[in-house]
Amino acid sequence: MIRVLALVLGLLGQGALADAQVPAAADGRLAHILQRGSLIVGVKTDYPPWGMLDAEGTIIGLEPDLAQLLAERLGVGLELVPVTASNRLARLEQGVVDVVIATMGDTATRRAQSGLLQPSYYSSGVVAYVPADSPYQSWADLRGQPVCMTQGAYYNRTLEETYGVAGQYFPANREAKMALSFGRCVAWAFDDTALVQRVLANPEDGYTVMQDRILVTPWAVAVARSDREASLGRFVSAMIGEWHSAGTLLALERKWQIGESAYLQGLNKVWSTPGACLRGADGLPPACQGAPPFAAHEDPRAPPDWMTRLRDHTGIDVLVLHEAYTRGRLAQGLGMTLALSATAILGALTVGLLLGMMDAALQRRGVWGQVLLLPQKLLVTLARMTPPILQMYIVFFGLGGVLAQSAIITPGAFATAALILSLYAGSTNAVLISHALAQERAVYPDAGVWSLLPHAFQRAYDGLVATCVNIVKAAGMASAIALAELVSTVNLIVSEGGDVATFMNGLLVFYFLLMLGVLWLFRLLRRWIVGSEA
Amino acid sequence: MIELLLSHTDYLIRGFAINLLISVLSMGLGTVLGGALGWLRAQRVTALGSVAHMGTNVCRNVPSFVLLFYMASMIPSEVTISGTIMAVPLWIKATLALTFPVVGFTSDQSRGYFAQRMAGLTGARETFVVAWVQYFLIILMASATASVIGADEIVGRANIVISQNESPQFLLLTYLYVSFWFLAAGLALTSAARLLTGRRGVT
């Protein structure tokens, strides 16, 4: 009887207003699931209330509820597996999970990688998180303003190109939020789903999200690519349609206290119109699918021939560089790295020279000299025994925060990084130079500090070069405080679709050559100093 | 404010233990590999020596900060071992990234050590130990950068603690507290080294 009913429904076309049925002749993955007697669904555990852990460590939330509904209809058990944004599609294709319901935005790129199902079951947009009394309350207000962003979000580039904000990229959400708290940007742009929940969870913090929600992207349930058009994909798609028409998703929003969203209300209205959402030969009518997927950035012009040939013959894929936007960014990052390196080398030599000479001059002044040297000794010890990245955070966020409150101009990322690197390497240089001066003095006891300096410099040369090379190596650390130098630019390009292997290997080769270049420059410098003395 | 910070001490110290673990492992692994390279370079066999020299050059010249991102994106985050999927924790990737500079450093130092030994000079071991401890300090400081790829360690944990209380004073206090742990470890390390080399000098 059920078989006959299923057959009839199958002939009528799936979806409609009828309940989604388990196909009688299940193929592919679905046959495997029914045989196994359990459905394995990948969900998030760090995205409350869509997917989270309760006090006992059980996975709960809106998405686990949807997974439960799927398993119940199939008449099988349910197993929930935690997945993350970076592994969810791989887990599907590996066959570790049958279905993924994990806050996944529907993008053109992902559609090419996996079996994303229509209709969408939810959506998120981008909003700005701002202090409640902020003068910036719309995206138009934010044009040209520094806005904190989390590295790797797929909409960052659109925010810069279309909405004209000055993106400040931080490695993770917590740094982006800290930068906002400590006055490094005027707003933090991120998913509205996460930010609205943050506001609700911390009402006393004094932050709000602006009403202006942009770049709305649908969320898609996914199955493996081969199952998209097989019985599993069709069954899950029909279930999502049923959730829309029956108001199940709206009820779950109320259950998890998210509040009914306009997006789901709209889909509910379309899906409850009889006959409106029948699956045709080319899928569902557009109105029934929800918002269109987030489009990939594609340059209409074809990449030059040599780029394609280079990729085909060597695997070196620089196709993204045919866009002027990406090329410009890379050039800017390169310039920033070179400028920071040069500034920090000069700073470290200056600091080293000053502190080293101070040390040599005061050493002979007895007790008072020793007392005057105490701050210098303290600085050298502190600079060497505190991680430089922590020093950058302290100056950038901490000092910046205090200074911002007192309305004094706060040092920017470049100044902060240059200062920290100069002091860090400068304190090592100071030790080297004061040692060298002491050794020179042993040879010429009566000479003044100034006249000893050229020979002392030569004596300490190798050590000074080693320290300066180390600063250039450490300069990438400035990316942690949102300086758009080479390391962070390369990460950005990779997150926007650049070839990982090409860009990461390229970065290593670049740094290798840069070090050789710095060593060569120092060799020239020594020849110049020695030559001018001769 | 101070009570709040002290209540997180346990959490932060566990994070610092990860920093120590990363540093110890990369120093250990790097010393073994770098020692082998240095030994090869100290021998008179030119072919192997130049290969070892090239390897050292690469390790010496590539920044560990860049290697962190390299490891994070180039090593798969999960590996399949006999059918079961194992996650590769980020701290292992950080350890691998920090191993490279240690290889470069130990290769240079141990070449000097082997050369001095061959020449019959004394004090080679002391020179090596003193430089090694200084480098341990540098690697310990560098382990703090592991947080940029999301590895769970003390600086990343400090940022989590800070996000719970937004005053700049609390931020400064927390960072200074974390600095204190690095400073204490650094001072302990250098004085232990002084004790070690000093005692050996006496006997």
Image (spheres, coloured by chain):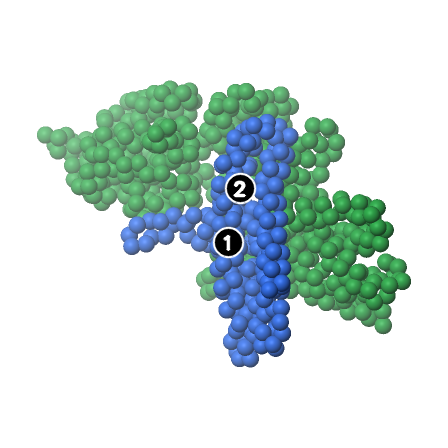
Chain colours: A green, B blue
- Which residue is at the front of the view, A91 or B14? B14
Q: Are marks 1 and 2 on the same chain?
A: yes
Amino acid type assigned to the residue bearing label 2 in the image? Ile
Graded by Cα atoms within 10 Å as few (under 14), some (14 to 19) or many (20 or more), the crowding at tag 2 reads many
**Badge 1 element:** helix
Q: Where, by quadrant of the figure, is residue A247 drawn?
A: top left
Q: Is the Cβ of the residue at disc 1 closer than 8 Å to that at disc 2? A: no
Residue A389 or B176: which is nearer the viewer? B176
Quadrant of res A3: top left
* Residue A249 horizontal/vertical position (percent): 34, 24
Residue drawn at x 30%, y 42% as measured from the top left: A97
Quadrant (top left/top right/bottom left/bottom right) for the N terminus of chain A: top left
Taking the spot 84% from the left edge, 50% from the top edge, the residue there is: A366
Query: Measuring 63% from the left and 34% from the top, which residue is drawn there?
Result: B172
Whether residue A476 sits left or right of residue A83 in the image: it is right
Label 1 lies in what chain?
B
Q: Secondary structure at mark 2?
A: helix
Which residue position is annotated with label 1? B24
Name the quarter where the C terminus of chain A is drawn: bottom right
Residue found farthest to the front: B203
Percent of width and height locating residue A317: 49, 57
Residue A382 place in picture, x, y as percent: 67, 45
Tag shown at residue B44: none
Q: Which residue is mark 2?
A: B154
Q: In the current view of this chain or complex, which residue is farthest to the left?
A: A1
Q: CA distance from mark 1 to mark 2?
A: 16 Å
Q: Chain of mark 2?
A: B
Picture residue at 57% right of the left edge, 72% below the top: B114
Quadrant of the rendered image containing residue A41: top left
Whether residue A366 is visible to the viewer of this picture, yes or no, is yes
Neighbour class for label 1 at 10 Å: few (<14), some, many (≥20)? some
